Every structure is written in structure tokens, then in C-alpha cells.
Amino acid sequence: LPVLAVVGRPNVGKSTLVNRIIGRREAVVEDKPGVTRDRVTYEAEWAGRRFKVVDTGGWEQDVLGIDASVAAQAEYAIETADAVVFVVDSTVGVTDTDEAVVRLLRKANKPVVLCANKVDGLSGEADATALWSLGIGEPHPVSSLHGRGTGDMLDAVLEALPEAPAQTFGTAIGGPRRIALIGRPNVGKSSLLNKVANEERVVVNELAGTTRDPVDELIELGGVIWKFVDTAGIRKRVHLQQGADYYASLRTAAAVEKAEVAVILIDASESISVQDQRIVTMAVEAGRAVVLAYNKWDTLDEERRYYLEREIETELAQVAWAPRVNVSARTGRHMEKLVPAIETALAGWETRVPTGRLNAFLGELVAAHPHPVRGGKQPRILFGTQAGTKPPRFVLFASGFIEHGYRRFIERRLREEFGFEGTPIHISVRVRE
Ligand code: GDP
């Protein structure tokens, strides 16, 4: 994997930034005590690309003394990294030490992304702009503490890093995309799986440790290899008398956990049930991309079709954003529409809105539709950032409590503006004093 080093003076916020970059998944892959310092490397992923991050923050307590420590960081980065994030405290401005680091980095000729950290409010932008004077390109205004601006900075990092070598499977980094085929008993999961597996190529069955059940199956559909996860329970038609629902729901939860996208099968010939809704909720709450497949379409008469549409509107409103296919596992109807629907949902799931575009949109929205006045005050959305993808997660900063209805309104408008077909989106609001 390509290596990114994060360097800068003590106290500029390197470790906070590294935590931002690696997100919640703090997988320490290396932690080797060196002679005079600890080298800590993490794995990170952004926009589907993985890379290593070297945190030099631990070098600050170095016996070498501050200046020597900073120089050592820079030299280390120069030796080993493919690109460097150089962190400067924008509230302090350029110091002699910063300039010394710039000289070293420039000599090394490694790509450098300049991070103007501690831009916590809109007023900090000017401080960030002042860092153009370092002569190493555009300063990226960031608040490592709040997450603001880190997305745009990471886009620049990806541009600076070399591409990782392509994986043998050639589909996505990390192997084939993972699909959970779920739905209540008898909706036709096994029939659908057999249909796609028989008509297309089943590449390999991955065998579970001790049993001979295929757990995950690799199936080529539409020229791409997909991994259908946890298919053992689908293939093996065990009919448990007692507790069947309980085991079915455990299996569903396990499959959803392992998957990126849930293809939820619904029996279109029957009324949409509470159990169907529970399965939908499970996938949404797990934050998976969602495709709805209405099966047994071959059995529908006009009257049932009419009622089905009404039921979908009322019972499945929570996933009105999910792409939909009307299929028949028996006749093979519309099977070819399954893959495009899955691809649409995955694309929505991975969508990232640049901070600039997001804030231009939020600014207009808030001006045109202000939050209702409460207790003589008007809570305002100050700015927002997309903190993550898979599914898209937004953090909005507000001057006061934002009501649920207004959040829903923002979610609706975000969807209208940016798509997000087939994906739940999370919005959290932080109130700033
Ligand atoms: P599972 O429990 O979800 O795996 O459901 P199965 O695949 O075992 O299907 C349950 C029943 O529905 C079986 O009798 C299938 O033959 C039938 N079935 C599945 N798909 C279709 C379909 O598209 N049309 C019709 N008419 N029957 C179907």
C-alpha cells in the first residue's frame, strides 16, 4: 500500500488529524519501538482507496529536542513515504521550524499536501489563506477537531498518492462486492440464487471451516464477480419447527453484517408484512445499500398489482429511495435488471459531496427556508461536512437545537440535490455555543 506521512511541529494537531483520517477503524498494523522513537502506522481508506498513515506525533517527546524531532520526522517521511501531509497551525502562522521543514520537503521532491489546521470557525479561513506564503501550494483549511475540511484534504491526498496495484479480482479493492440476499422464508431466495447461479457462472464456493456448506458464493453476473454472503442457510432448506423465525432472523442479521448491499426479496403475491418491514429496517439500521426485489411477479393479476403499489407507498416509505426491480425467479423475468440496480445502490452508498459544494447548497437552503423561530431564537445551520461514506454521513454544525422535522427536510433536499439512490444517509447535528 502507498504510504502517507503526517509531519509538523509539536501541538499543531497531527495525532488528532491522524485519528480523523483513520476514522473509527483504528487498526494498528505496526507498532515498532525504534531506538529513540515509536513508529506508528495505521491503515486508512478514503473513497475506496486504501493507504498507510504514519503518525509522527509520538516523536514529540523525543530526547532529541523539539527541532531535531521535527527534522527527524521530515527526514523519515522523505525516506519512506509516497506523499506527505504537512500540518501547520493556522492560528499561529508560519514559524521558523515550519520553514525549515518546507526546505527539507522541497529538496526531497515528494508530493506535499499542506494542511492548515485549527480552522474551527468561518473566521479561520483568512489564517489558512496566509499559508500560501510557504510556497508549497494550496493550504487546505481543516479542523481536525471537528472534522471540517478533512474530506477535501483527503481528496488531495489521494491525488498525491500513487495508485495501489490492482487486485487480482479486478472488481473493487478488497475483493468482490458483497451481497446479502435476504427476505422472509418462502419469498424465493433459494429460487433466485439458483436461477442466477445456474444461468451465470458460479466461480468458486468458499467452504466454511468444518462443514461442506457453501457460505459465501462467488457468482459472475453482468461480467463482474459478486460475492453472495452467507448463502448456506438459503441453499440448505432446513425447516426448523420451533424457533424458525428466530434462526432466520439471526441468519439475516449475520448476512447483513457481512454485506455491503442488501438485496431484499419481497413476495409480491402476498401482502407486505411486518416481517418484511423488520428485515428492511435491519438493513437500513446496519447502514447497508439497499435494493428491493419484488418476486413472483409472474403470478400477479391487475388487482394485486394495484394493491401492491398502495402497500409499497404506505408500508415501505422508509426505503422510498431504494432502487426497485420486479422479478420472477421462476421465469427469469427482469433478472438482467438486478445488477444495474445493485450498482446504482452501491454508487449512492459511496457518494461523497465535496465540502465546498455541500456548504454552497446548505447556505442557499438555509437562506430560503430558515428553521422556525423557537423561544425568540432562530437556530441556524452554520456549515456542514460529509464525515464519511458507506453510507454517507453528514455532520452539521448549528447555532441551536435543530428540530427533527427540519432535519428530515434537510435530508430530503440533500437527496434531491445529490442523489443517494439506494442508500440510507446519516445526519448528525452539533450545536456550537
Ligand atoms: P426462500 O425460503 O426465500 O428461499 O424461498 P424458496 O426459493 O424456497 O421459494 C418458496 C416457494 O416460492 C417455492 O415453492 C418456489 O417455487 C416459489 N417461488 C419462488 N420464486 C417464484 C417466482 O418468481 N414465481 C413463482 N410463481 N413462484 C416462485
Image (cartoon, grey):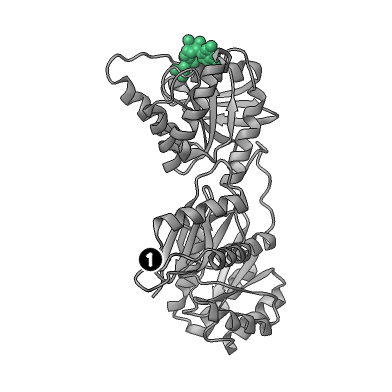
Q: Is the residue at mark 1 in contact range of ligand 1, meaning its CB lies under 8 Å from it?
A: no
Local crowd size for mark 1, using a 10 Å CA cut-off: few (<14), some (14–19), many (≥20): some
- Image check: 108 left or right of 382? right
Residue farthest toward the left in the current orientation of the protein:
242
Residue 128 spot, x, y in % from top left: 60, 80
- Vertical comparison of 119 with 311: above or below: below
The amino acid type of the residue labelled 1 equals Phe
Q: Which residue bears the numbered disc 1?
A: 401
- Residue 27 in view (yes/no): no
Q: Secondary structure at mark 1?
A: loop
Q: Residue at x 55, y 13 (%)?
A: 299
Residue 213 spot, x, y in % from top left: 46, 19
- Vertical comparison of 27 with 369: above or below: above
Q: Residue at x 65, y 59 (%)?
A: 158
Q: Quadrant of residue 24?
A: bottom left
Of residues 166 and 120, the one drawn nearer to the viewer in this rendering: 120
Of residues 12 and 191, the one drawn nearer to the viewer in this rendering: 191
Q: Residue at x 60, y 35 (%)?
A: 342
